[in-house]
Image (cartoon, helix red, strand yellow):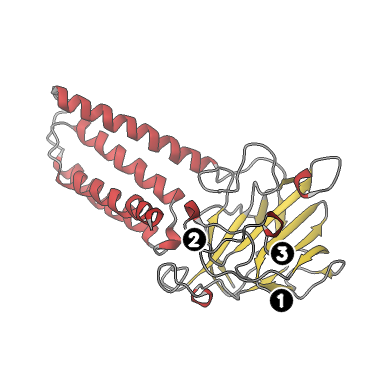
């Protein structure tokens, strides 16, 4: 509950306070107004890029931009006759220093998040493994601000994606953190092979856990999964539903072939450890060490229909 309150404050309370401040503040100069608009703008950009919008509804992601633009138009119409600069009291100077500091912090965070929308290295081209609906990337990209799997050194999970399904209202579930797996739109969604290749390994014996429950063993970390060797890349599709997998190690698979269904298995954790809910985990790895164990491989960037998918990307799959 505490983490949920933090997220609610970050996504709604703080922006609302900023908007009221921007709307009602009496500005003494154009500089004062522009400085305030900068602070609000960089914060809105920060939560737009890195927010957990699937929790509240995808379309709320655009709400604060619309409110900000309305407030900005009103502010511009008010300060036309203001001087560019006016003398500041000590209290007003402190307020400007305060706003300047937090503007730089959120500007830096926003730039860091935006930097993660591109990647460095050789990518593997794949087909999106889900069909018939709107799917939303809740973790993904080349920055820790938008991908909780990201590290600055080569690790297998570096470019991993976590994907949920949204309904027509942009929600990932019926209600906030419902207790039944069937209430989550992704649960039971069919997963298809994103590439041609050979099945390297299969896990299909782990139970689907109730939401928010964690499995505590490292050896069940990926949950039920299929690993496909596609050229020099191993493609992992994890968190699958118990007994849903239809392939075996050694099988040859083709792009678009049914592999299994999304479940809620393995060692799971949502944003800020808030909850563990059904989603599809996708990652690609390349060999990086003399052996071929999991931790002797490094993450490979993945392109789907030529696009590098990052946090808060909506995929409309036919």
Q: Is residue 29 left or right of residue 138?
A: left
Query: Considering depth in this image, is 123 or 73 the residue closer to the camera?
Result: 123
Residue assigned mark 2:
275
Quarter that holds the C terminus: bottom right
Bin the neighbour count of mark 2 within 10 Å (Cα to Cα): few under 14, some 14-19, many 20 and up. Answer: some
Looking at the rendered image, the quarter that the N terminus falls into is bottom left
**Residue 243 - label:** 1
Residue 95: horizontal and vertical position, in percent?
Answer: 21, 30
The x and y percentages for residue 71 are 22, 49
Against 224, is 109 above or below?
above
Residue identifier under label 3: 194
Spatial distance from mark 1 to mark 2, Cα to Cα? Answer: 24 Å
The quarter holding residue 21 reads top left
Circle 1 crowding by C-alpha within 10 Å: few under 14, some 14–19, many from 20: some
Helix or strand or loop: what does disc 3 sit on? loop
Q: Is residue 45 left or right of residue 67?
A: right
Task: Give the foreground label among 2 and 3.
Answer: 2
In what element is the residue under mark 1?
loop
């Amino acid at each position: 509950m505490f983490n949920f309150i933090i997220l609610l404050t970050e996504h709604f309370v703080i922006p609302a306070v900023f908007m009221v401040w921007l709307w009602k503040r009496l500005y003494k100069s154009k500089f004062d107004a522009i400085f305030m608009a900068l602070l609000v703008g960089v914060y809105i950009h920060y939560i737009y890029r890195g927010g957990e919008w699937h929790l509240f509804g995808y379309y709320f992601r655009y709400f604060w931009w619309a409110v900000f633009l309305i407030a900005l138009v009103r502010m511009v119409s008010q300060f036309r006759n203001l001087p560019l600069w006016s003398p500041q009291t000590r209290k007003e100077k402190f307020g400007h220093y305060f706003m300047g500091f937090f503007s730089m912090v959120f500007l830096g965070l926003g730039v860091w998040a935006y930097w993660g929308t591109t990647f460095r290295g050789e990518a593997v081209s794949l087909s999106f493994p889900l069909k018939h609906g709107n799917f939303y990337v809740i973790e993904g990209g080349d920055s820790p601000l938008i991908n909780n799997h990201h590290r600055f050194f080569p690790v297998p999970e570096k470019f991993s994606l976590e994907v949920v399904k949204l309904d027509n209202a942009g929600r990932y579930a019926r209600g906030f953190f419902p207790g039944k797996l069937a209430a989550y739109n992704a649960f039971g969604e069919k997963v298809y092979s994103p590439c041609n290749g050979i099945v390297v390994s299969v896990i299909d014996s782990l139970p689907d856990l109730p939401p928010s429950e964690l499995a505590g063993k490292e050896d069940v970390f990926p949950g039920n999964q299929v690993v496909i060797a596609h050229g020099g890349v191993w493609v992992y599709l994890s968190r699958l539903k118990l007994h849903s997998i239809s392939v075996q190690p050694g099988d040859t698979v083709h792009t678009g072939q049914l592999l299994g269904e999304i479940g809620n298995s393995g060692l799971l954790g949502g944003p800020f450890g808030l909850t563990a809910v059904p989603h599809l985990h996708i990652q690609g790895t390349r060999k990086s060490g003399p052996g071929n164990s999991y931790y002797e491989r490094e993450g490979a960037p993945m392109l789907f229909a030529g696009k590098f998918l990052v946090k808060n990307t909506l995929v409309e799959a036919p």
